[in-house]
Amino acid sequence: MFRIFGPPGTGKTTTLLNMVDDALESGINPVDIAFLAFTRKAANEAKERAAKRFKLDPDEDLRHFRTLHSLALSKVGIRPEEVMQPSNYRELGGVIGHRFQNVDGKDNDGDIFSGKINDPILSLINLARLKKTKLRDEYNNSNLYADWNLVKYVDESVTAYKEKFGLYDFTDMLSQFIANADQCCPHFKLTFLDEAQDLSPLQWDIAHILDKKSERMYCAGDDDQAIYRWAGADVEQFINLPGGAEILAQSYRVPSSVHRIAERIANRINKRYRKEYNPRKERGSVAQISGLSELDMSHGSWLIMGQAGYMLSPLSQELRGMGVLFNDRGRRSISDKISTAVNAWERLRKGTDISGEEARCVYSHMSTKTRIERGFKKLPGVEDSDQLTMQDLINKHGLLADPESIWHEAMDLIPDNERAYIVAMLRRGEKFNADPRVTVSTIHGSKGGEADNVVLLTDLSPAAEAAASIDADDLHRVFYVGVTRTRENLYLVEPEDLNRSYLI
């Protein structure tokens, strides 16, 4: 197994994909190539790239471009209907008298990987299986607020339920693949495995099987960016793998001033593969700030990060007060429905047609009796694609609102806090329909991302402090990831309490 170490911005995934291109150009049958990514998104991007460039059938020719779970599922013969669904956990919970948390969603319609079940007890049971540790040991090391006897009972009940009905969960897919590897694991000419630093011990078992079944195997990762130990990742296996290794030595992202900070953090990590890489020639900048109000955020992309989610809420409120449009942990700071309604109303006032779908957004924010006649709230008889003028709405569709009134007068159901935010955005010149240039995220949530400007909170959560006393390496890796998302300027937010901060 040949390792490729990819420090931040050095293009390790691109390197793997270029190697795939070279293999296909040399005439290797694409069916004999496996490209295994950590997420479906990454696997699909690799598949789409190869399919487009070489005019291949993504489902047939590139059927081994998958996640590890998906590969296991495809080879062990588990059918989608044999996979545990939210309804199964609800049924089991009713039988054993335990309500599973966060399993209230619908069953997955054919796409078994689309949903997540986040019950704390189930997560702990799964973590022990991924790490190949005893459940009791994992329980003793956790902060789970549940009695051990309950955890043990749930574990035994889930196992019995699956056996009774012939069902499997996601970790079972991996275990089944490992148990039946001789029969179900194909032989490959080339296998590529990305983000290897995030593999759990159980996933490493599959990686070693693939290595034996492949003429050549490459695994790419960066141990300094291994920040998922809490989810079972075993970075030591990646560090200690025998065989050759290559270090990608040129970062195309990190400027020199930020690189110096990053190296200072990386050198604090005790268990690591020592490596050096060159930053971009651009110097960039590093500065300390006390708050977001000190920054001119009118240009470029911005990534604002904290070590824990709860630290980000005050920053989100500050951004709203400033009138900044942003993404907050995957969600836009203003709903698409409200922004569509405001834009549509203002276009109506200016004499522009709007669609039936846009008109419904407008009407959903208006009161009946005063703004809309009763019976017209959902615009009966109007198709989403229909084009409507202000006079159409007044004459045919029950509009009572003054056509001269501005959006916040006409749409009286928009909440006051959203009104204030919209006004601030309009004063700032933000365009509602644009993709936000500013993103608020935890450091863990930002992994793989980058921005021109990075704002990093140096505060530590109590959980991080406690964890650091056990293994400070994990904490260093988290802040290393945070710092190295920077393309140009890094801003370090001064903590309120120096005793509760990560000193960079």
Image (spheres, rainbow, N blue to C red):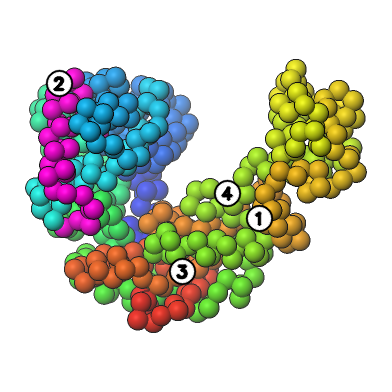
- Identify the residue at horizontal 60%, vertical 63% (top origin): 319
Is mark 1 in CB contact (under 8 Å) with mark 4? Answer: no
Alpha carbon distance from label 2 to label 1: 52 Å
Residue 280, image x and y in percent? Answer: 46, 68
Q: Nearer the viewer, residue 305 or 254?
A: 305
Q: Amino acid at mark 3?
A: Leu
C-beta proximity under 8 Å, tags 3 and 2: no
**Numbered disc in front, either 3 or 2:** 2
Provide residue 144's location: percent of width, then percent of height: 23, 53
Is label 1 or label 3 in front? Answer: 1
The magenta region covers 141-170
**Which badge, 2 or 1, is on the more N-terminal residue?**
2
Residue 169 is one of the magenta-drawn residues? yes
Residue bearing the label numbered 3:
456
Pointer 4: what residue? 332
What residue is pinned by disc 1?
A: 417
Tag nearer the camera, 2 or 1: 1
Q: Residues within 10 Å of mark 3 (few under 14, many from 20)?
A: many
Dot 4 alpha-carbon crowd within 10 angstroms: few under 14, some 14 to 19, many 20 or more: some
Judge from the rendering whether residue 278 lies leftward or rightward of residue 34; answer left or right: right
Residue 316 in the image, given as x and y percentages of width and height: 55, 61
